[in-house]
Image: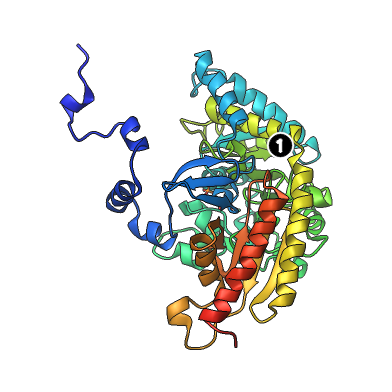
Amino acid sequence: MKKDIKSIMPEFITVDEALKFDEETTRNLQYTHLNKTRTILCNCKYFVKADDFTFYDEKGDKHLDFIGAVGVCTVGNNNPFVWNEIKKVVESGQFTMGVISLHNVPAAFAANMAKLSPGGKLTKMATATAGAEAIENALKLVKLATRDKPEKTHILSCEGAFHGKTTGAVTVGGKEKWRTYVTGLPTSTHDYVPFGDEKALEDALKKGIYKAFFFEPIQGENGIKVPPEGYYKKIRELCDKYDTLMVADEIQCGFARTGKMWCLDHEDVIPDVLVFAKGFSGGLIPFGGILAKEDVYNAAYLSEETAMHHTATYQENHLCAAAGNAAIQFVLENDLITAAAEKGKYMLEGLKKLQEKYPKIIKDVRGRGLMIGVEFFDVPPGKEAEFGPQYSLFLDQVLVDDFRIQVMFTINNPAVYRYLPPLTITKEAIDYCLESTDKAIQKAIDVIGVV
Ligand code: PLP
């Protein structure tokens, strides 16, 4: 006879109970069993409801989402259309999981992604459960695809780049900090060039030793760095010239965020491999993957010897694929690509006016579409210990605590905080955010002072 869980394990917490937790209980459990210091450093709030670009706390207060779980909630939080498409798969009762079965929804998602890929040319896909795992997938792919070229010994990527935190991803990432203590990494076969620097890229590639060049079309965690116009075309030209695979990490900047489906579409450039994650599950299910040109993918995986070299239990998962498919459909049906371009331009102009008003506080405002970063100057000497080295950290906290606007500094460059709201954000919400940013800067001047 079935027993009740509480009779087996009295302290077992059910989902029903967890969903009714108050903030204190949740915080205490999180401190005890999850990453306590991260929770404190990230100034985590307790939201009992999320709807589109609004969060509600226990008191019923509203908070505006201008970070979208770091670019994940592209179609808004708890998007009902995406949930409903996932529900259809659950209710179908079908079995499409794992290596033993065919996958209908993932195959459909892959076919749709192939059509939407840059130039419609990246027709092969492999999915993963997150961005960093997708980067691992890309690393494996380029290594296998070039295995018959003994002169190709190295991987090239960019200084300051962020590609995730698995051991492979921190190796291709350009920030030393994330490699510290992670010993035994193959850094001797990885080189890094300054982002956006065509000459440095050519000087490196002409050595002829690189299997692939990994880059973010806009560097996200390094402070929303937009490269000079023509950079993507130049990468394509140099990668062709020096027989190096071009791998674009569009995990943060892809999927409509910059006002095009893919950031590389701004220059109509087709990479050999494109890495996606974040927005593709509507922020509801862990998801990521790669798209690749058929010849590159086949060079890696067509042979029986290597076909199984990069498999994973949850690869080609039907729930993730349903979420991905639904998120695409929602973006296209609601023209969120145009929305990102228009609202992003409006917000960027508003922030540039703030920069003119506070030239000694705001160093730079930059971005594309709804991927916008604000870089701040250092605080006056002697104030660093109390307020952190730049105004950004103080302002981030004031926006979150006083104005209930969620933003976040960029982890490889904390002088910058960024706005990555859901693409469904309204102009009214942007206006409130701009007014609040203005007031937060005034508070910073009152509290910290200006040099
Ligand atoms: N690549 C880029 C450009 C990212 O911004 C991120 C995450 O922020 C990743 C890779 C890693 O993705 P994940 O956190 O899903 O592993």
Q: Residue at x 49, y 14 (%)?
A: 93
Residue 255 position in % (x across, y down) = 69, 43
Q: State yes or no: Cβ of the residue under disc 1 lies below 8 Å from any atom of ligand 1.
A: no
Q: Nearer the viewer, residue 252 or 342?
A: 342
Q: Residue at x 52, y 46 (%)?
A: 55
Q: Is residue 365 above or below residue 324?
A: below
The tally of labels here is 1
Give the image quarter of residue 11. Answer: top left
Q: Is residue 330 above or below residue 413?
A: above
Residue 439 position in % (x across, y down) = 61, 69
Q: Is residue 108 above or below residue 35?
A: above
Q: Is 182 on the left or on the right of 215, as rendered?
A: left
Do we see residue 253 in this rendering?
yes
The residue at which mark 1 appears reads as 331
Q: Is residue 120 above or below residue 150?
A: above
Q: Amino acid at mark 1?
A: Val
Image quarter (top left, top right, bottom left or bottom right) of the N terminus = top left
